[in-house]
Each structure stands twice: as structure tokens, then as C-alpha cells.
Amino acid sequence: MKKGKTAVLLMNVGSPDEPTVPAVRKYLTEFLNDKRVIDLPWLLRKFLVNGIIIPFRVKNSTGLYKQLWTKKGSPLIYYSEELKEKLQAKLGSLFEVFVGMRYGNPGYKNALSEIKKKGFEKIVLVPLYPQHAMSTTETSLIAAEKEIKKQGIQAEIYEVGQFYDNPKFVDAFAEQARKYNLSDFDHIIFSYHGLPNRQVEKCHPGIKVGNCSCRNALPEHGKFCYHATSYETTRLIASKLNLKKSDYTVSFQSRLSNNWLTPFTDAVLQEKLEQGKKNILVLAPSFVTDCLETILEIGVEYGEEFKQKGGNKVQLVESLNTGDRWVEILAEMVISQLNS
């Protein structure tokens, strides 16, 4: 028994084991069959995911992962492992930090098995998603809770929730943006991972996304609404950067259909180009770790398309990744949760 010691489990979405069709198919099958990712009735979800989405997307997705892959592997995984080591050094000997992806490897089930074996008295679950959503924070915490119960782990459980409004998180993202000369850019886009409108509206039944006031201020019903907190994240960071409302736009990327949150990032880029704005800076504050959606989708795909249409540059602001300030923020969140 590790008397008095605390396990810290960092959780993120995950990545295929390698950029091959079988590995990507396996990853997508686990990911997209999660009822909190595609929240449709069981039979319809199985038909849509396994009969349509995966067969039609797996080759293209594999090609994207091949572009993303480095000598160290998937950026999401190696950044997470490096973050674990830095957070371990920061927290010290009374803690042991683990990484457990919701899908794929290193998996949360194996991490929890190791935690059980070592007999920790306390476990802090840390989903690495700034804004709460059922397909990210919620599915990660519920999956971990179920596995803890299944394995019979006897420990005090603490959970770090959304942290989009943590002042130090806001400062850290603003500092990332300041690495670039903001005056060199014609416009700034805050791009968030998209979600189906129906998932967002489950947070506030009867209030449609299109009619919500959250684009201007955070409403009472929006505290755990991904759409509302995305706009609030933007306002907080924009304030730190002294941006006027006309300086920036909020948008959403990575859609699977047109019934997802709008405006779409690629459409906003096109609109800004038509307005004569040829140099665009993009922040992606729903990601704390750079991955396929930031490095490839924004940095490469959107950037190349923008240039082909006559633009000069789409510059991605790197995420927090393993920066020292981010490590300090994580350590403070963990300790604060234990003390609360």
C-alpha cells in the first residue's frame, strides 16, 4: 500500500496505435460506437457507424494519420507522455501520474489496473478538455468511474472538471497567441471542435442553439453548455489580448454533417478572404494538446486551401502541450481538487 500517495490520471481522446487501415479502423470503431459521441439509438448508431461512416472514412483517415505521424509517433500520445513526466516532477513523490486515453492506447483501463495494483488511497481523474461536453469530459469520467467500480478499486475519487474559465489557463492561451505579432494578421479565428446541435441542446432543453444569447454573454443555463462556454472562453482570451469584437470570429471545425455547430471554420476562412483578409491567426482553445485537428486540419488543410484561393497565410497558434505554465496550472488544479 502506498500510504498517503495519490494517483493522477490524465485522460484524453486517444489515437490509433499506428497509421494503418486496421489500426485506424479499430480506433474509429471504439471511438464512434460510444453512445456519448454519436448519441443515436443503438441500432441506428451501429448501422451508421459500422455500415457507413467507418467503411467510407477509414482510408482517408489513415492517410491523414500518415501525414500526422512523426518518428515519435502520434503527437497526442507523445505530448501526453511528456506532460505526464513533467507533471510528475512538479507534483513530487507523494503523487504518481498516469496517462489513460479514452480510446486506444495507452488506455484508461490498463492505467486503472496499475493504480489498483499499487494501492493508492486517492485518485484524481483529470480529463484534459477545457469545455465540458458529453462526448469528451462526460464520457471520460463515466468510463473511468465504471472501470473503478468493475475493478473494485478502493480509493477516494476526485474529478477535475472543465477549466475554460481558470484565469491561469486563459493567461496561458493568451501568452501562446502573443508569440505572434497580432498586428501582422488581418483577423483572428477562435476555432473549436464541432458537436451536433442536438448534443448541445440536451444541456438546455427547449433552448435552440441558434436562438441562444450565449454569443454575447454566458447565460445561467450555459455553464455546462459547450457552445456557451466556447464563446465565453473566446471572450476571456480576447479580453487578455485587448481584441475588439470586430477583430475575431468564433467558429467550429471537424463536422460530420451540416447539423453541427456553426459557423464552420472553413466557411469563415472563405468569408474573410472574400473580405480581403489574407493573413489569419487561428487559436484552438478546445485543445490543450496539438493533434490531428489542429496540426493537420487547421495548420495544413485549411492553410493550403486558403493559399490556393488567394490568401497569404493561416497561422495556427500552438496549443499548451507540455509548456511549463500549463504543467504548473495542472498541478494547481490537482492539488486544489484534493483540498476542496
Image (spheres, rainbow, N blue to C red):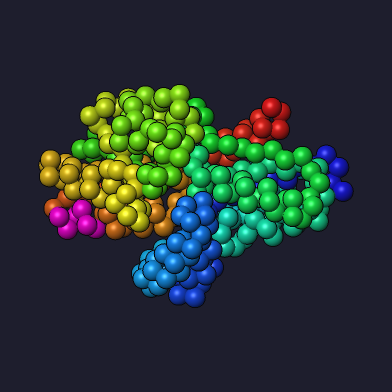
Q: Is residue 139 left or right of residue 210?
A: right
275, 133: nearer the viewer: 133
Main secondary structure type of the part rendered in magenta: helix
Query: What residue sits 22% from the left and 57% below the top?
Result: 305
211, 176: nearer the viewer: 211
Q: Quadrant of residue 189?
A: top left
- Estimate the x, y position of residue 66 in percent, counting from the top left: 41, 69
- Estimate the x, y position of residue 221 in percent, counting from the top left: 45, 27
Quarter occupied by the C terminus: top right
Q: Which residues are magenta?
A: 304-309
Q: Is residue 253 left or right of residue 99?
A: left
Query: What residue sits 33% from the left and 27% below the top?
Result: 213
273, 135: nearer the viewer: 135
326, 15: nearer the viewer: 15
Residue 26 visible in image: yes
Q: Quadrant of residue 158?
A: top right
Residue 299 visible in image: no
- Estimate the x, y position of residue 113 in percent, counting from the top left: 74, 57
Query: What residue sits 35% from the left and 35% below the top?
Result: 208
- Estimate the x, y position of residue 31 in percent, counting from the top left: 51, 60
Instruction: Count the labels in the image.
Output: 0
Q: Is residue 338 left or right of residue 50?
A: right
Magenta stretch containing residue 201, yes or no?
no
Q: Is residue 186 above or below residue 18?
A: above
Query: What residue sits 29% from the left and 51% below the top?
Result: 258
